Every structure is written in structure tokens, then in C-alpha cells.
Amino acid sequence: MDIILDPLIPLALIAAFAALTVLCVSFAVWRGLPGWWLRGLAGAIVLIALANPALQDEDRDPLSDIVMMVVDDSASQKLSDRESQTAEAVERLTADIESRGMELRTVDVADGIGDAGTELMTALSEALAEEPQARIAGTILVTDGQLHDAPRAPELQAPLHTLLTGRSTDWDRRLIVKNAPAFAILGEEIVLTLKIEDQGAVPGDVGATADLSIAIDGDEPQTYNVPVGEDLELPLTLTHGGRNVLQFQLDGIETELTDRNNAAVVQINGVRDRLRVLLVSGEPHAGERTWRNLLKSDAAVDLVHFTILRPPEKQDGVPVSELSLIAFPTRELFLEKVNEFDLIIFDRYKRRGILPALYFDSIRQYVETGGAVLVAAGPDFASADSIYRSALGDILPAAPTARVIDEGFKPAISETGARHPVTADLERFAPRPEAEDGTPGWGRWMRHIEVTETSGHTVMTGVEGKPLLTVDRVGEGRVALLASDHAWLWHRGYEGGGPQLELLRRLGHWMMKEPDLEEEALTATVEGQTVTLTRRTLAKTIGEVSVTTPDGTEQVLTLEEISPGRFVASFEGQEQGLYRVKEGDIETVFALGPAAPREFVETVASGDKLEPMVTPLRGGIVNIEDGVPGIRMVGEGRNASGRNWIGLTPRNAYVTTNITVTPLVSAWLFLALAALLTVGAWLREGRR
């Protein structure tokens, strides 16, 4: 039962009346009126009457206390016997709490979306938002202590306890990639920093070194014996552009908690700092400037242009000392520094005796060891002075027939070219739609050098379906033969022009071994949990694709051809980690999330991350290994944990079902008292 005030008029008016009363009494005292105290009592009684004091009586129904229990059901909780430990603790705590008449709210926390890890505090905050805080008697976390959202911990008013799963003998070994760049320049050395770290109670029979396997782009791995607990600096030089996949793998040890964190995948994009191109031109012609302008327009290209402005057979009587031409350093370019070029282009060049046979043989060796040569053939290619009659003839994919066809024709994509990445879907870059007769929407070329394919693949055809563009792999390098010197007509817009820039860009990148333009490739694209596999091939059919998941299981997928030479299939990755994909002799790896998911970065149970939250609330951190603790009721502010027990604080919450309000004194009685006091003051002052 409580005393309350139920004012008859607004409090502001009562305050104004109180101020007026004080003023009047003060004036009476100043004037020396003997009844001032009676006047003051009369005013006070009126004020009490206006405030209307009353007795309030409530009928209350008590509410049961609520206990929040958050159960960690993440991937790390499935290690060792933690699942059975958790189940036992939850069962015993549930029975104990419910036997005390308390309500139990159990929240199961699975792995976070993506690679968010264990979000215990987020789940606790969301659950508490649905419950009245005045009824929460305590919170119990059943976990291994490895949470990843500690900053999101809610403000609690009752004890917080942690029951730790795991064993005191648990230990684990993990591989850490401390430093790995996302990009690297080809040919320049970079340094990756790795570390092998042991956690927990490491057995004495575990050595101080470990075997580390390193594989690049799915190739055969190489194994090294390295120390544990030290930073390992791994120098690396990328050999090809595009994505380079480096896979690191530690041998698992039977007694460690898991080997899921024994692997790491690093993806580094290789980029070229500068593309060094040597352009060797024969007699000047309309297309020479097109080649030069095309190459010079790219700031990433270092162009060295070797051209014949004065052939040796020219006899015009001009003394050599008066010529302004500079002798080109042919020996330095074609013998000493030929391997420094990424691409050599011969544009309508023929043998003139300027480049000895030894130089052409040097270029042949350059290609076989990884270089690239593009020949843009003119009429001279069909003559007796053709560079095909040199050592280059051993590596060129087509041989001239000595016939030059001077007539208009539209270049066409061959059946193989429709599958080859250099020319696949090139028609969509045409300046106008395909004609009614099915010919591409680009202009004609006016000259075709007749050649016969000897190796490689013909991806474009010309007059009567004869080879126009033929590409081939020679040793470690690549060659291409364009059997026409009229590609420049597309650049000049003749009859609408054509996609010369796109064609030569693709051709150059294919010769530079860019992974995106490999004709035989298997790639994986990851978006969230969806993985899209793409198999590009020149073959008309392919076999099934084998996918090995992180846990070692294997599934087989059938890819569907969506365009010539391009087969695609998608699947949902159910598990974070490293996947291996194989079709025939082609194999690749990719990581869904990190190779070692966040759940497996730290696997040894520990209460260190939760201690800053548990200690201020006088809770406890208990190892389930030592037994499931009992429950005691403790007062608010008291220590809530001890040996083999944890405490909950009764909140004594209730709900009010009825309220009765009874005035203390009748307002009319108060008014009569005030009147009597006022009259008394008047009589006293009147008698005086």
C-alpha cells in the first residue's frame, strides 16, 4: 500500500497558489499581525486538499524469472567430443532450471552467413530484445569460447556465465598466411610470409618442424621441411599473367583437433609492367602506320620499330656519309637481347640479306623457349625471298603456295575459330549486323596470300575458305600467321571497317599466354555460395567434371554447352574451404571462402575472449570437462559463481492486476478546517 497524490487541479496552479500563500504569510509577518501562523496553516490545508493525498493498494501476480541459454552449434563445436559435452550440459541445466520454476529460453547459434564465424553476441542481443529485462535472472553460454562478434555484446543486468566445451589436452596446428599481395608484376620477385603455429597443449612427441607442400596452379606439389613457430619468407616470381593460384598444405597429425586449418590458398593476379614489342617492317606500305599507331597508342607497350627504308640493292649514287639514316643494332636485337621481347611482329618483311640466317635461327629458338612471333604476310611471303624460306619456316603453321589472290573477300570465322578464344564471338564487334546471306557485318579485304595449313589451327578463312589466320604452339612459345596485309582496311573504315583492334588485342594476349584467352581452360567463378564452372575447349565434346569438396567427398557434374567450345555448370557449395576441380587432364583449385574458414582459425577452447564480459557481472567460466555445475540463487550484486556452481539472481518481477485508490481525508473537511483557521486569525487580530 502506497500514499500517492491525485491533484484536483493542475500542479502548475497548485504551485502558483503555494507561492501566493507564502507571499501573504510573509506580508502578515512583516506587518506584525498576530494571526499570521493561523493564516499559514489555513493556506497549507488548502494546498493539501488540492493535492488530494490518497492510499493506493495494488493486487500483484508474481512472474517467473527467465534464464537465457545460448548454445554454440557452429562448426568448431563439432570437433572431438564437444557435441556430446554440449548435449549433456544443456540437458542437465534445462532440468535444473525448470525444476526451480524458471522459464528457459534456448538459442542455438549456427555458423554465420558467409565466413562470419560464431556470432554468439548477435544472437543473444536479438533474443534479449524480445524479453523484458526485468525478468532476466541470468545468461548461460555453452560454447568453446571462440566467438567473432564480441563488440556486439549487449548490456546485461544479471549474471553472465560461460560453460566451456573441449579438453585440457586439446591442441591444434594451423598454417597462417601473414602477407600475400593481390597483384604482382610478372618477372619481379615478391615475398610471401607464412607461419606454422601450434595452439593448446602440444604433445611432447610433436616435432619442431613440419612438412609443407606448395603447388602452383594445381601442378605437382613440392614438399619442404620447415620450422614451426617462425615466420617463413617465401620468394616467388610469377611466370604468367592473370590468376595464379598457390596452394599450401601441411601434413595432418592424428592427435590434433582438425586439419582443416592446415591448408591455405593464395590467389595473385599477375600483371605485366611493360609489354616489349619488336616490329620488323619491310617496304613501307599503308598498313605499316596502322601497326605502329596501334602499338604506340597503348602506354603499356614499349615499341622498338625496325624498318627498311633503304634496301641494299638500291643504287642511287648518294654517298653513304650523306645519308641521315642510322644503322640499326641488328646483332644486339636479334641475338643478344631477343629474349627480352614479349612479342616480335614481322610486317611484310622478306629476306634481303640484312638479317643473316643466324638471326632467324635465333628467333626460332626464342619462340621454342617461350617467345611469340606474329607474321603479317604480304606478297613477298609468296616469293622466293619469303621469310618462310628461313629458319622461321620450321615454326610457322602454314606454308605459302606462291599464289597471291588480289580480289575482294570478307574474312570469315572458321568452325575451329568459333571455338577459339581469339576469334570466338568476334562478329558481335562488327560495325553492322550480319548480312542476309550470313556473311559478317564488316568490310572486305582486297588481298589474300594463299597458304596451306601445316600445323596449328586455322581460326579465320579468306578466299574460297582458304586459311587466313592460323595459330599454333611451338615448344613453350606461340606463333601466328595472318595471310594478308590488308587488315588496315578495317582500321581505315573501308566499307564500314571491322573489329581489327579487338582481333589484334585478343591475338596479342593469346600469344602472351593470358589465362583468359587459353583455348583449353577450366575456371571457377564464385559468387556467395554459388560456383560456376566454365570449360573452354576446341573439342566438340568433353567428359564429366569431378569436384572434390573440402571434406574429401567427390561429386560429378555434367557441363552444358552454351556456345561453341564453352561448357558451363553451376552448383551450390555447402562447405567453406578448398575445392579441387578436374576434367580430363585439366585441373584447377578454388576456395569457397578462405581455405581455412574462420571457424577453424582458432580451435582450442578458451574463455579469454569472454572474460571481459563475464567478470563485471560476477559470473563464472566453467570447464564442462570438470563437470556440469549446479545452480544457486544469489542476491543482486553478490558473487554469482563458485566451485562447481553458478548463480542466478531472482528478479521478483510481477504484473499488477488491480489498483484501488482511497482518499485520505474528504476535501470538504479540509475546506472547513481552512475556514475555521481563517476565522480564528481574524478574531485574534480583531480582539487585539
Image: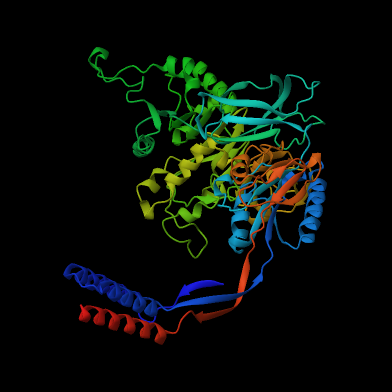
* Point 55% across, 52% down: residue: 155
Single out the residue that lies furthest toward the left: 31
Residue nearest the viewer, comparing 634 with 107: 634
Whole-percent x, y for residue 130 in the image: 60, 64
Please report the residue visible at 43 percent of the width from the left and 46 percent of the height from the top.
500
Measured as percent of width and height from the top left, residue 363 is found at 52, 22
State which quarter of the image contains the C terminus: bottom left
Instruction: Determine whether, in the image, residue 228 is placed left or right of residue 525.
Output: right
Q: Can residue 548 be seen in this view?
A: no
Which is nearer the eye, 334 or 602? 602
Q: In the displayed structure, would residue 432 be above or below residue 194? A: below
Report the side of 400 relative to 504 (left or right): right
Quarter of the image where one finds residue 651: bottom right
From the viewer's perspective, is 262 left or right of 99? Answer: left
Front residue of this view, candidates 236 and 320: 236
Does residue 108 appear in this view? Answer: yes
Relative side of 463 to 18, left or right: right
Residue placed furthest toward the front:
687
Residue at image point 60% right, 59% down:
128
Q: Exactly how many numbered labels are in the figure?
A: 0
The spot of residue 330 in percent (x, y) is 41, 17
Q: Nearer the viewer, residue 369 or 204?
A: 204
Q: How is the image coloured?
A: rainbow
Res 274 quadrant in image = top left
* Vertical side of 51 occupied by 188: above or below: above
Across and down, in percent, residue 392 comes to 54, 26
- Quadrant of the drawing holding the N terminus: bottom right
